[in-house]
């Protein structure tokens, strides 16, 4: 097999614990990520599951060079990128993008949706032609199901689900190879969650993206991922193909997480939506 | 058993600059002691407004309310501010979603619980020492480890799960007869959620409380509620005993929620089926059936006729507001359920 798309080896990230406000002093350290080795293969969808404080978000940020590790190696297509800076890092940003949990907090309230989605092009000096940039923004907004007209609206005019679509449009704007989504739906209502997850799934298929989905919920990951990594207190507890993990979890902690997911009685209705009996006005937003 | 909390034809409207928001539009429900009603709905469905009106919290110059909210026979909507202060905390209490903002950050947890106790101690009063002893007892009752130490903790020193436990301790301090829990586990990890739900069930049984659980998560309801009301755009669109609702849901919106839920017993990699569109604005909601713009089974008539909540044949406790013929609904659901087996 060729080199994984992205990987971390014996990754460690420690944060200092401090006391005092004026006279800050170090009183210890906490290992947010503690000796984690994990690879993401091209084209796959990998779920990273863990509870608050498990280190899953820290791991994702190190994977994207948004945070420097204390120890260990980060690789991209086999290249050691642990401490890259400057032009190389700038180039890597294009290939690897992050979708945030809180779409409201990650959008500038004073910028229109169009300007927000055009940002990545400005930052990377792409599509300097104004009309060309506007055309591409419109295309992206269509692609995430917002429609080109959304370009003139402001974040506060949008619902949470629509804002998350803007976040996704920004993330895919530069044609990344790897998309890391950090709890992309945990702030959304159930019916909207399914819309966003379905969008991510479709984009992954259409754009050939590799997806890392960070979640606290094993049920979401089951619908979205090929492989699952379970983290607890900075350590990797178990990594397995999705079927295997759910059918025969090896770690006690995985079993505990599985047992904690509320069970819904009755049949699990799935599959495509049936056709409406008559032509109707039901349409996707 | 007769209901402790009975909401009858409740309407709540808010006057805003953009128009009148009809947040709750003719909602009725009842909860008996020792029972739990789950109110399920999305943001803006009116579930929180419907339930908090029972606390007399929905008041003000720009709020218009009609209907009745009977708490042990007494109409809360008519109660004076003074009477409400007596009821809140003592007869009816509430657990909020975000324990960090519901707790005062600069007051020790034990003191906050003591305050709740002393507020309702009556003319005889309650000494500081006695209140503190009772606070420790309460922390123990909600399974906080080492309550003698935690009683002196500040909220930021506790984990999210422990804060929620402390908030629950405060809510049950005066042994209320009705407990309203508004998304009590939404901010928590799944393993902690499980513990908190178990705690709420235990306290409900121990204290014989009538409980209203507000949530957007059908899984939470399945594990906790005896009866479920599904709200959409200010109305209850389906209401049934929990087992009945999950076995034979009748409303296309309920089906939509069930199909949109990620679940562990679905085949791995199976698609989630989103409900298209988004919840309607409550300023000028859709005509006819309010769900019709998002419904896959809409007919021309459904755009004009507003369905009423009516009992399902053979199951008087199961009521649904849907204009589709019942036989057709059953056939449609059977089809959806069969797809999962395939």
Image: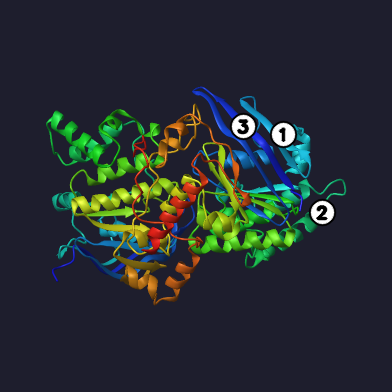
Horizontal side of residue A43 vs A17, given as left or right: left
Q: Which quadrant does the N terminus of chain A fall into?
A: bottom left
Q: Residues within 10 Å of mark 3 (few under 14, many from 20)?
A: many
x and y percentages locating residue A61 in the rendered image: 30, 56
Tell me the CA gap for discs 1 and 2. Answer: 33 Å
Horizontal side of residue B287 vs A148, given as left or right: right
Return the chain for callout 2.
Answer: B
Label disc, if present, on residue B77 of the rendered structure: 1
x and y percentages locating residue A254 in the rendered image: 42, 71
- The reply to whether callout 1 and callout 3 are in contact (CB within 8 Å) is no
Q: Disc 1 vs disc 2: which is toward the camera?
A: 1
For marks 1 and 2, the one nearer the N-term is 1
Can residue A73 be seen here? The reply is no
Q: Which residue is mark 3?
A: B12
Tell me the CA gap for discs 3 and 2. Answer: 41 Å
A96, above or below B57, in the image: below
Q: Which quadrant does the C terminus of chain A fall into?
A: top left
What SS does tag 2 mark? loop
- The reply to whether callout 3 and callout 2 are in contact (CB within 8 Å) is no
For marks 1 and 3, the one nearer the N-term is 3
Q: Which residue is mark 2?
A: B127
Return the chain for callout 1.
Answer: B
The colour scheme is rainbow
């Amino acid at each position: 097999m060729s080199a994984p798309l992205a990987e971390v080896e014996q990754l460690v990230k420690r944060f200092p614990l401090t006391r005092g406000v004026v006279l800050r002093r170090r009183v210890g350290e906490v290992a947010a990520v503690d000796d984690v080795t994990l690879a993401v293969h091209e084209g796959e969808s990998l779920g990273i599951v863990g509870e608050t404080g498990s280190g899953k978000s820290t791991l994702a940020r190190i994977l994207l060079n948004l945070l420097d590790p204390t120890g260990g190696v980060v690789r991209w297509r086999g290249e050691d990128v642990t401490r890259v800076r400057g032009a190389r890092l700038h180039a890597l940003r294009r290939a690897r993008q992050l979708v945030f949990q809180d779409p409201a907090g990650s959008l500038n309230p004073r910028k229109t949706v169009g300007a927000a989605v055009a940002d990545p092009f400005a930052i990377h000096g792409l599509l300097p032609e104004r009309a060309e940039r506007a055309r591409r923004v419109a295309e992206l907004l269509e692609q995430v199901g917002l429609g080109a007209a959304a370009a003139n609206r402001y974040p506060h005019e949008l619902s949470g689900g629509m804002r998350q679509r803007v976040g996704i449009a920004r993330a895919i704007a530069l044609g990344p190879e790897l998309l890391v989504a950090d709890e992309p739906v945990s702030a959304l209502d159930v019916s909207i969650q399914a819309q966003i997850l379905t969008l991510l799934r479709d984009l992954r298929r259409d754009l050939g993206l590799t997806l890392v989905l960070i979640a606290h919920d094993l049920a979401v990951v089951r619908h979205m991922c090929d492989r699952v990594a379970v983290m607890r207190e900075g350590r990797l507890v178990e990594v397995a193909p999705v079927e295997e993990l759910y059918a025969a979890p090896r770690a006690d902690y995985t079993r505990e997480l599985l047992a904690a997911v509320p069970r819904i009685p009755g049949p699990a209705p799935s599959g495509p939506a049936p056709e409406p009996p008559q032509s109707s006005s039901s349409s996707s937003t | 058993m007769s209901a402790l909390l009975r909401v009858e034809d409740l309407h709540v409207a808010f006057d805003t600059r953009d128009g009148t928001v009809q947040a709750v539009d003719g909602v009725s429900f009842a909860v008996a002691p020792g029972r739990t009603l789950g109110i399920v709905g999305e943001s803006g469905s009116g579930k929180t407004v419907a339930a908090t009106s029972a606390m007399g919290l929905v008041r003000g110059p720009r709020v218009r309310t009609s209907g009745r909210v009977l708490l042990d026979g007494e109409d809360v909507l008519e109660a004076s501010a003074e009477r409400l202060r007596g009821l809140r905390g003592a007869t009816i209490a509430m657990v909020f979603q975000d324990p960090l903002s519901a707790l005062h950050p600069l007051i020790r947890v034990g003191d906050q619980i003591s305050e709740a106790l002393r507020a309702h101690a009556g003319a005889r009063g309650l000494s500081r020492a006695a209140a503190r002893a009772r606070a420790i007892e309460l922390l123990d009752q909600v399974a906080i480890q080492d309550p003698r130490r935690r009683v002196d903790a500040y909220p930021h020193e506790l984990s999210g799960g422990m804060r929620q436990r402390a908030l629950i301790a405060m809510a049950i301090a005066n042994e209320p007869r009705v407990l309203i829990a508004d998304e009590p586990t939404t901010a928590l990890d799944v393993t902690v959620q499980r513990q908190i739900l178990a705690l709420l069930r235990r306290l409900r049984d121990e204290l014989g409380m009538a409980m209203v659980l507000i949530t957007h998560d059908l899984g939470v309801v399945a594990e906790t509620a005896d009866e479920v009301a599904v709200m959409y755009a200010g109305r209850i669109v389906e209401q049934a005993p929990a087992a009945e609702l999950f076995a034979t849901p009748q409303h296309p919106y309920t089906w939509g929620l069930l199909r949109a839920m990620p679940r562990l017993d679905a085949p791995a990699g199976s698609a989630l089926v989103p409900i298209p569109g988004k919840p309607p604005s409550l300023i000028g909601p859709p005509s006819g059936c309010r769900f019709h713009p998002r419904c896959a089974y809409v007919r021309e008539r459904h755009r004009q006729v507003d369905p009423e909540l009516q009992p399902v044949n053979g199951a008087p406790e199961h009521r649904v507001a849907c204009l589709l013929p019942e036989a057709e609904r059953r056939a449609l659901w059977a089809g959806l359920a069969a797809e999962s087996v395939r």
